[in-house]
Image (cartoon, rainbow, N blue to C red):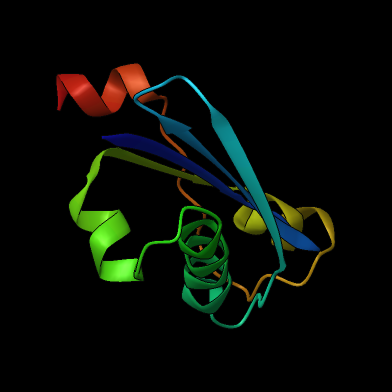
Amino acid sequence: MFDLVIDTGGTFTDAALLGGDRQISVAKFPTNPANPSVSIMGCIELLARQQNYAIEELLADTNTVVIGTTLPTNTIVEKKAPSAVCCIRKVSEIYRS
């Protein structure tokens, strides 16, 4: 079984796959800010190839998937965000809701 961690950044999407044998595989794919799922799936495809798995097999054999991103933060810092209200909540507040 695997655990998968993905970070979608402004330039690259990085992924790490931890196997049951505690071996770590990594992948890097250019980020598509307009459609981050392309970048996420690109990393998953690269990791699947490294493991000699089809994407579907890798995902079926994965216990945990964690995805993080800095894209919203980058949009605000670069002042590319549309005029709208931005609401940010602490994780602890979300769990209390």
Q: Residue furthest bottom?
A: 34
The answer to whether 9 appears left or right of 67 in the picture is right
Q: Viewer-proximal residue, 4 or 74?
A: 4
Q: Viewer-proximal residue, 66 or 83?
A: 66
Image quadrant in which the N terminus is located: top left
Estimate the x, y position of residue 78 in percent, counting from the top left: 85, 62
Estimate the x, y position of residue 90 in percent, counting from the top left: 42, 25
Whether 87 is drawn above or below 34: the answer is above
Residue at the image point whose x is 81% and y is 63% from the top: 11
Residue 83 visible in rendering: yes
Displayed quadrant of residue 84: bottom right
Q: Viewer-proximal residue, 25 or 75?
A: 25
Residue at the image point whose x is 56% and y is 56% from the top: 50
Residue at the image point whose x is 75% and y is 60% from the top: 12
Residue at the image point whose x is 22% and y is 47% from the top: 61
The answer to whether 6 appears left or right of 91 in the picture is right
